[in-house]
Structure formats: C-alpha cells, structure tokens
C-alpha cells in the first residue's frame, strides 16, 4: 500500500513529554514507526516497523483522553493521529 502523496509524516520529535500514557500507549515509538514508513512511501510496512511494540502499547489501547496532546510541544493532535494509526493497523490486518 503506497502512501498518498498528500500524506504527511507526524511531526513528532521524540521528546517524550507525552509519556507516560495513562493507558500504556507507546506514542513516540508508534509515531517513529509510522514516520519510517511514510519516508519509505509504504504504509504496508507499518505492522513490521511497529512489530517490537507490545500489543498493549499499540494504537488500540488509546482512549483519547487528551493528556498527551495537552503537553505536546509540537501541538500534535495525538488522539486523532492514534485513531488514524489504529485504522491503518486494522486495514493492514484485514489483508
């Protein structure tokens, strides 16, 4: 699956201000994995790139509490990005 040309990388710097997530989501790790895929222009690699992240720390664990977004110096809408990553994971697992 190719990333649409309009697709953007998530502007996460890995500062970890968003951590710890109260629900255990590895926010910087997931964003890093996604950004590697975006750089390669292949979201199909997302499951492989994020494969070292335990299931309990993946996008499905996000409850959109917003704690992370309130402290993000990059002003990333983290709950919205996690929803997108969750949808991407689900789509890739269907294949």
Image (tube, rainbow, N blue to C red):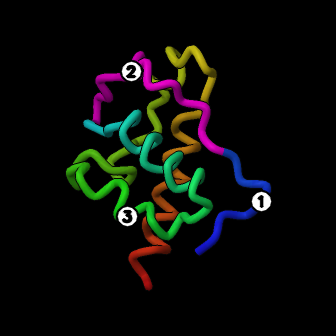
Q: Mark 1 points at which residue?
A: 5
Q: How many marks?
A: 3
Residue visible at 23% across and 55% down in the picture: 55
The label on residue 64 is: none
* Cα–Cα gap, marks 1 and 2: 28 Å
Q: Position of residue 49 (x, y in %)?
A: 37, 56
Q: Residue at x 62, y 61 (%)?
A: 41
Q: Position of residue 80 (x, y in %)?
A: 58, 43
The residue tagged with tag 3: helix, strand or loop? Answer: helix
Closer-to-camera residue (77/16): 16
Give the label on residue 47, or none.
Answer: 3
Considering only order in the chain, which callout, 2 or 1, is on the residue closer to the N terminus? 1
- Crowding around mark 3 (Cα neighbors within 10 Å: few <14, some 14 to 19, many 20+) is some
- Say if mark 1 contacts mark 2, CB within 8 Å: no
Magenta residues (range): 9-23
User: Callout 1: helix, strand or loop?
Assistant: loop
Give the residue displayed 41% in from the left and 22% down from the top: 18
Q: Give the distance between the C-alpha atoms of the residues marked 3 and 2, in whole angstroms.
A: 22 Å
In the depicted structure, whether residue 55 falls above or below residue 9: below
Relative to 6, does residue 10 appear above or below in the rendering? above
Question: Are there few (<14), some (14-19), or many (20+) residues within 10 Å of tag 2?
Answer: some
Return the residue found at the far bottom: 95
Image x and y of residue 81, in percent: 56, 44
Q: Residue 16 carries which label?
A: 2
């Amino acid at each position: 699956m190719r990333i649409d040309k309009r697709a953007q990388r998530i502007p996460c710097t890995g500062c970890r201000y968003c951590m710890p997530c109260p629900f255990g989501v590895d926010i910087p790790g997931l964003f890093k994995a996604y950004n590697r895929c975006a750089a390669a222009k292949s979201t199909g690699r997302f499951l492989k790139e994020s494969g070292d992240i335990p299931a309990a720390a993946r996008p499905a664990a996000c409850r959109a509490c917003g704690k992370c977004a309130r402290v993000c110096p990059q002003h990333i809408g983290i709950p919205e990005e996690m929803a997108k990553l969750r949808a991407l994971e689900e789509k890739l697992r269907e294949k």
